[in-house]
Image (tube, rainbow, N blue to C red):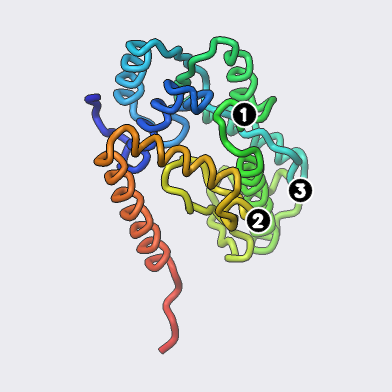
Amino acid sequence: MQFDRERKASDLEILIDYLEVVAVAAGEKPAHLQGQGMRSKSFNHALRKVAEAHGLLVMQTGPLLPRLLRAPEYDPRFFEWERQRDREARAREGQVLWVYRDRDLEPAIRSSTEGSTDVSEVLGYPACCVREYFEAGVRMSEAIVRCYQTRYDAKNADDFIRLAKENAPVTIPPADRPQIRYVYSYVQFSACRECAESPTSPAAEINWAMKRLASRLSPAFQRAIEKAAKAEVAARREGRQRNSPPQPT
């Protein structure tokens, strides 16, 4: 499949995109969502042509809105402003592409895109991992507001909105930073704490199923995923070391 990389910078992401679409075609995954993160218009176009040529269904929607299970613990006026800002930003981002086999899935896709239902069932991801991922976003927002309060003496929603519009610098303490766990090479979701620590967890089982599928497709394809995953780990480690404060000598 030929395409321009554009913002598709990750070899691993491209390979897992391929694998997920094959999983949909094989009936091992309900749907694949393309273009939610790093986006390449030519990749989406090429993927759509391939999916349709193999009898799969496709749908374009707006980008996925997060489904939050709780409101952040700060002024609700700022929360509503953030949600509106996110909706407007996603409207400017363009559309994402869903690939699926079962036409009966379409109402659930539309509902999850709007953030009104859980996307985990549509994508075949563990609900616990999806919940923790969205909860991490809430905790990060709360940490940013605490920084506004302590560093800039912000008192209310008006102060928070002004600082957000100004892109005021914030420093999030390590203890307040959400833990994103990239422990499984063959899936695109980050594992929750429980799934990351158990070899028999829902996330681990999905990873093994996808690994077996990659092996059935081609041992060379599986080796390419393993190589790309090691490169991702090395890049993340290098990034953490680069961003770490200097140690006393």
What whole-number distance in Å separates the C-alpha atoms at marks 2 and 1?
30 Å
Return the residue at label 1. 121
Residue 162 makes an appearance in the image: no
The numbered mark at residue 74 is 3
Q: Residues within 10 Å of mark 2 (few under 14, many from 20)?
A: many
What amino acid type is highlighted by mark number 1? Answer: Glu
What whole-number distance in Å separates the C-alpha atoms at marks 3 and 1?
30 Å
Residue situated in front as seen by the camera: 194 or 39: 194
> Residue 112: horizontal and vertical position, in percent?
62, 24
In screen coordinates, is 71 left or right of 47? right
What amino acid type is highlighted by mark number 2? Answer: Ala
Q: Residue furthest bottom?
A: 249
What whole-number distance in Å separates the C-alpha atoms at marks 2 and 3?
10 Å
Q: Residues within 10 Å of mark 1 (few under 14, many from 20)?
A: some
Q: Earlier in the sequence, mark 2 or mark 1?
A: 1
Residue drawn at x 67%, y 51% is 139
What amino acid type is highlighted by mark number 3? Answer: Tyr
Residue 148 makes an appearance in the image: yes
Residue drawn at x 31%, y 26% is 43
Task: Relative to 145, say whether 64 is above or below.
Answer: above
- Residue 193 position by quadrant: bottom right
Residue drawn at x 56%, y 62% is 171
